Image (cartoon, grey):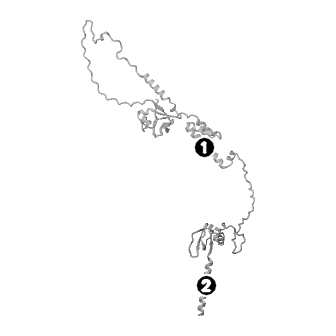
Amino acid sequence: MQRLIFQRALAAAFLCLAGMALAAEFTEFKFKDGTSVKGEAIGPKERDVVIKDTDGKFLPRTAWTNFTQETLKEFAKNPKMRQYVELLIEDAAPATAVAGGEINIPEVVVAKRDWKQPKDVTDKRVVPKNPSMIAGMFGTGVGWFSMLVVYAGIIYAGFEVAAYRRRPKQLVMGLSAIPIFGFFAPIAFLCMPAVKRLEETKPNSVAQAAAIAAAAAAQKPEEKPAFPGKKKPGLALGKKVDDAGHAPAPVAAPVAVASPVKAPAPAATPAMEAVVYRRGETNINKRFIETKFAGFFKAVLGPAEKEMWVVWVTATGGEFWSKRIVSISQTDVVVNCPQESGGTLDETIQIAGIQEIHLRPREG
């Protein structure tokens, strides 16, 4: 009997101790609005924390700014929550705080580092404080490379200008290779007029057409009258009488003799005449060129087209003598121009830049 009473008393004591331990685990959290709640803080974050009350219910997340300074200090005792609330505590404790007192925020001391004077480098190149542009260009490898690129570009510009203005390439490129002064050589040749080719020095089509017409008129045979000489008196009435007054016997009319039938000669190809089409007088466009010069689009020219030149006069003063039109678009026309060396070269001409189109007969 006594053993049973002892066992019950011991169980009651354990229950009391367990209740006190559970009661000690819960903390009272006070808010700035005067309310408070008992529970446990879990899930701390940068801006808020979750409170679990004594009944095991989870309250909505509460911001750290809603707690009182006393509660924030209690939070600061927990190492996991200190980093979130230590900046919100207004009266932080000094560096030495007793156990159970205010929180201890240690002061971070940055160790000072001694400044060491850098050592001087031996055989160090002396760089001028304010170098000139030319000295700076020739003083580095990058500068030399840049100068070489510019020098090659000037020589290449001379090559292009010589091809465009039809000047001797060796002359223009040689002058462009002269240091400093070579920069102005391509500009000077670009300002000069282009050298005309041999076929471009031919006479103007209008003067040539007038000369051809005059030569044809000079070679035309002079027409003779159908009945040269004077009429005799006896021919006025169609009769002739002798001295005795008798009319001569009638003479039989000549009988026409049939001539052999000849085959008709083949029709000669009509020759093309020299003509000039000028912008302003004529609307020079793709349709006009295709209509007026249709025969020159053929790969094999006809007899009439072979005897003619098509001369294209541009706004820049250049003339292109061609025998055939290769292709045409809305903006450009490509013509095949014979060269002095015996070959041909396709030239592209802007239709908007064409001022005149001459159709000239071939000389000789």
Q: Nearer the viewer, residue 284 or 148?
A: 284
Position of residue 197 measured from the top left corner of the image (x, y, whole percent): 52, 34
Q: Nearer the viewer, residue 279 or 160?
A: 279
Q: Amino acid at mark 1?
A: Gly
Q: CA distance from mark 2 to mark 1?
A: 101 Å
Q: Quadrant of residue 93?
A: bottom right
Q: Is residue 103 left or right of residue 19?
A: right
Give the residue at x 61% y 87%.
10
The residue indicated by pointer 2 is 14
Q: Is residue 166 left or right of residue 118?
A: left
Kindly indicate whether the residue at mark 1 contacts the one at mark 2 (C-beta within 8 angstroms).
no
Q: Within 10 angstroms of label 2, few (less than 14), some, or many (20 or more) residues?
A: few
Q: Secondary structure at mark 1?
A: helix
The residue indicated by pointer 1 is 153
Note whether 218 is above or below 26 in the view shown. Answer: above
Q: Secondary structure at mark 2?
A: helix
Q: State whether residue 146 appears in this view.
A: yes
Position of residue 171 measured from the top left corner of the image (x, y, whole percent): 60, 37
Give the residue at x 65% y 49%.
142
Q: Quadrant of residue 264?
A: top left
What label does residue 334 carry, if any? none
Q: Residue furthest front?
A: 34
Q: Amino acid at mark 2?
A: Phe
Position of residue 144 measured from the top left corner of the image (x, y, whole percent): 65, 47
Note whether 294 is above or below 55 in the view shown. Answer: above
Q: Nearer the viewer, residue 332 or 164?
A: 332
